[in-house]
């Protein structure tokens, strides 16, 4: 990858470099993609003031230098086209550059581009976008390569962003993208992301570690240079061809180790390291023997990651030696292929080997990806889904071994049951016990790194115990246990679930008969994606959802229903349903079945043409029109007699009020820049107000007239381009 601070590559240089690596046919497609990207991002600037095209060019260069295929590099140059281009869709990309490229672009494109999502909070938006990203990675691992390159370049230029955006991006990078890079073995990207995030999130700690690191830097560098010289001479004498280089420890890694050990910087043994890169595995062990014969190794500091590779594909020999002046230093010995894998991880394997595609080779290396799919099938809530991924796959984990020596990585705190279900679902279901390092162990034993785990199974074991749900750590194991109970004893689960819900209602002092009205439970069933009341009881019975959770939902619906106006009696008993369909628009709305009714729009959600809508018959005020996703609609839908079908008139040119909340910089000129942007788009502002927030941001709320959602999306996109604007949200009023 490009060194930090280097000159930006020009489009012609990128194309010339691409031409050296790929076929003429692929080059022709890429040339068109570069021209497409230049046109798409014309007149767009980055926060630094550079032309925006600099960013996709640098991302494409990174992806290309990692040795990825032509489709990946082409998608990299186009990765922001849908998200930041005007009226560009994934289908446009597919038509121009093929479905493979389009799918990759779609994988890294945020959901908010579609304009169909309305988010209440930034966290909700982040959860939805991360869910989409994780599932895209599970479907095609190349997505993660492009996304990490994208985030790394953004982190390198983060200094030009406002303080609020810097903090938010840095935290997300440290929490999500650096662990993701680590999971895929991309050490170089992980280390740089962590250090950059550390610098912005904890500037005082960063400065302190930097100062301590520099205090004896000259002495350490002298030690390193001398050690490299001596080792080079020793290996040449032994006839071992090697490339030797030195590297300092990443500052964030030093900080984490000091925190973990509660130690000072002088107690960290691997502040400096020497890399010895040789041709073969035999050369690795031969070099180790030569080095150990001449230097004093520190006991307990030798690690053989060649014989037992890390799950993220990392392989190397590690040993820590003591120099004559008492300064410790680490030596890493690996082959050229191992080194490339250590730097680029999964990207290093993107090539054909022995007639098999890389995807088949990587399947067992990235088995956790399949569990992402499993998590999707059993978790509808985006926040829960993302939290599961973060905890199970991107958090701290332990490395345990099967009796055959295969390494299995599990989240820290996992038990033998988690191990059993990771190996195979049936092994989990029939687990009777476990041996840890040859000794019998409890099923709730907390696994430790290097534990050898053997699962004892029996066909006489009928299946999992409900108590196991309290023992397992991983969401994957928990889902498999729940699914077993769901399928195994449905009638028993239904009866148990009914009793559990009734007991919960009694304890809460709520009459269960009133709560289980069809109008209430039908709403709950829809929210939980269930088909019948028995499905709900069964889910409660096997532990898929808690009785308390269902009870609270029912109580909330009853409370809301109590506040709703009583439905007017029908004008005439036995009145026939009106079958005449109206096609006469009123205020841009067609009311089906009643052409004479007055129409007004709900102030709570301000629907616009393009929004899915619903009509509600009010008392004395005609039809109230709401967005289908309006929070108040859930209450209104229970009064089915007052729901009426409405639709937008196709040729309506009416103006409608829309409201936005804008988070921007608390600086002079912010309001005027926003107003000027709207004026340039010929938008009539109805009201505008602003207030400072506690974190230095400035919150602006404004209402203006638009004709449809398409026009609103154009406004949002142009506001987001302003340097003084951080976020823009559509408001429910």
Image (tube, rainbow, N blue to C red):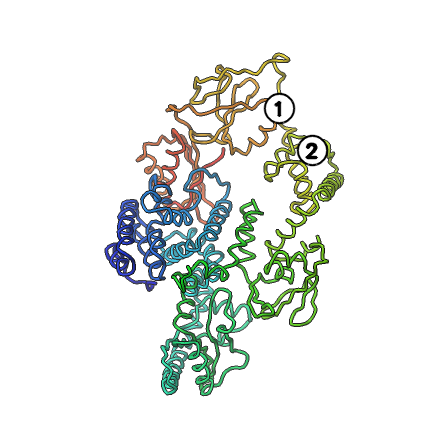
Q: Residues within 10 Å of mark 1 (few under 14, many from 20)?
A: few
x, y percent for residue 357: 41, 59
Measured in 3D between alpha carbons, the distance from the residue under mark 1 to the one under mark 2, in whole angstroms, is: 20 Å
Q: For the residue labelled by badge 2, is the local secondary structure a helix, a strand or a loop?
A: loop
Q: Eyeballing the image, is 306 above or below 543?
A: below
Q: Residue furthest top?
A: 572
Question: What residue does disc 2 label?
Answer: 516
Disc ID at residue 266: none
Evaluate whether residue 653 shows in this view.
Answer: yes
Q: Eyeballing the image, is 273 above or below 85?
A: below
* Residue situated in front as seen by the camera: 417 or 616: 417
* Residue situated in front as seen by the camera: 497 or 363: 363
Name the residue at 31% across, 44% down.
96
x, y percent for residue 347: 40, 61
Residue 19: quarter of image: bottom left
Q: For the residue labelled by badge 1, is the local secondary structure a helix, a strand or a loop?
A: loop
Q: Eyeballing the image, is 685 above or below 284?
A: above
Name the residue at 69% across, 33% down.
516
Does the residue at mark 1 contact the one at mark 2 (Cβ under 8 Å)? Answer: no
In the drawing, does residue 708 fall left or right of residue 457?
A: left
In the drawing, does residue 57 fall left or right of residue 349?
A: left
Evaluate whether residue 721 shows in this view.
Answer: no
Name the residue at 44% across, 82% down.
286
x, y percent for residue 545: 65, 45
Which of the marked residues, 1 or 2, is nearer the chain's N terminus? 2
Number of numbered discs overlaid on the protein picture: 2
x, y percent for residue 243: 36, 77
Q: Residues within 10 Å of mark 2 (few under 14, many from 20)?
A: some
Q: Quadrant of the N terminus?
A: bottom left
Question: What residue does disc 1 label?
Answer: 565
Residue 675: quarter of image: top left
């Amino acid at each position: 990858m490009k060194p930090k601070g280097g000159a930006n590559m020009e489009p012609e240089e990128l194309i010339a470099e691409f031409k050296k690596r790929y076929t003429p046919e692929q080059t022709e497609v890429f040339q068109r993609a570069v021209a497409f990207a230049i046109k798409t991002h014309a007149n767009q600037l980055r926060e630094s003031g550079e032309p925006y095209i600099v960013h996709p060019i640098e991302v494409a260069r990174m992806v290309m230098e990692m040795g990825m295929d032509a489709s990946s590099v082409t998608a990299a140059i186009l990765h922001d086209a849908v998200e930041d281009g005007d009226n560009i869709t994934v289908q446009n990309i597919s038509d121009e550059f093929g479905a493979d490229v389009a799918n990759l672009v779609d994988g890294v494109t945020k959901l908010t581009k579609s304009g169909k999502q309305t988010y209440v909070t930034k966290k909700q938006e982040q959860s939805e976008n991360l869910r989409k990203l994780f599932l895209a990675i599970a479907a095609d691992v190349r997505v993660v390569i492009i996304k990490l390159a994208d985030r790394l370049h953004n982190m390198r230029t983060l200094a030009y962003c406002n303080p609020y955006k810097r903090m938010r991006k840095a935290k997300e990078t440290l929490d999500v993208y650096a662990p993701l890079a680590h999971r895929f073995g991309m050490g170089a990207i992980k280390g740089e992301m962590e250090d950059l995030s550390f610098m912005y999130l904890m500037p005082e700690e960063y400065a302190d570690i930097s100062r301590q690191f520099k205090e004896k830097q000259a002495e350490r560098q002298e030690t390193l240079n001398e050690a490299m010289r001596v080792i080079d001479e020793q290996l040449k004498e032994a006839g071992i061809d090697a490339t030797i280089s030195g590297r300092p420890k990443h500052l964030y890694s030093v900080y984490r180790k000091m925190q973990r050990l509660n130690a000072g910087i002088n107690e960290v043994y691997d502040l400096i390291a020497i890399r010895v890169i040789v041709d073969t595995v035999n050369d690795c062990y031969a070099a180790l023997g030569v080095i150990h014969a001449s230097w004093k190794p520190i006991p307990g500091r030798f690690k053989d990651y060649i014989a037992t590779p890390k799950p993220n594909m990392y392989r190397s020999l590690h040993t820590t030696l003591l120099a004559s002046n008492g300064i410790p230093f680490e030596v890493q010995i690996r082959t050229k292929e191992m080194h490339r894998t250590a730097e680029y991880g999964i990207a290093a394997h993107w090539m054909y080997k022995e007639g098999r595609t890389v995807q088949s080779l990587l399947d067992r290396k990235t088995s956790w990806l399949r569990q992402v799919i499993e998590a999707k099938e059993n978790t509808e809530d985006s926040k829960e889904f993302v939290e599961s991924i973060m905890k199970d796959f991107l958090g701290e984990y332990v490395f345990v071994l099967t009796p055959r020596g295969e390494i299995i990585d599990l989240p820290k705190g996992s038990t033998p049951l988690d191990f059993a279900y990771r190996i195979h679902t049936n092994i989990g279901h029939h687990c009777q016990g476990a041996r840890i390092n040859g000794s019998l162990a409890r099923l709730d034993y907390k696994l430790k790194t290097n534990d050898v785990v053997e699962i004892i199974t029996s066909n006489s074991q009928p299946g999992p115990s409900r108590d196991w749900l309290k023992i397992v750590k991983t969401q994957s194991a928990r889902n498999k246990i729940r699914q077993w109970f769901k399928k195994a004893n449905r009638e028993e689960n239904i009866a148990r679930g009914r009793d559990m819900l009734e007991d919960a209602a009694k304890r809460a002092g709520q009459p269960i008969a009133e709560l289980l009205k069809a109008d209430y439970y039908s709403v709950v069933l829809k929210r939980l994606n269930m088909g019948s009341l028995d499905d709900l009881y069964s889910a409660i019975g096997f532990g898929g959802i808690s009785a308390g959770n269902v009870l609270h939902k029912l109580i909330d619906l009853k409370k809301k229903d109590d506040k709703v106006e009583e439905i007017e009696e029908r004008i005439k008993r036995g009145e026939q349903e009106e079958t005449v369909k109206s096609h006469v628009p009123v205020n841009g709305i067609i009311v089906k079945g009643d052409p004479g009714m007055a129409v007004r729009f709900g102030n709570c959600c301000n629907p616009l043409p393009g929004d899915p809508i619903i009509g509600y018959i009010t008392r004395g005020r005609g039809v109230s029109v709401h967005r289908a996703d309006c929070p108040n609609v859930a209450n209104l839908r229970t009064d089915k007699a007052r729901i009426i079908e409405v639709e937008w008139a196709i040729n309506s040119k009416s103006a409608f009020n829309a409201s936005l909340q804008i988070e921007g910089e608390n600086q002079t000129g912010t309001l005027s820049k926003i107003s000027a942007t709207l004026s340039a788009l010929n938008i009539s502002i109805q009201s505008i107000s602003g207030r400072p927030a506690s974190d230095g941001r400035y919150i602006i709320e404004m209402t203006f007239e638009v004709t449809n959602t398409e026009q609103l999306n154009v406004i949002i996109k142009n506001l987001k381009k302003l340097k003084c604007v951080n976020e823009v949200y559509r408001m429910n009023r």
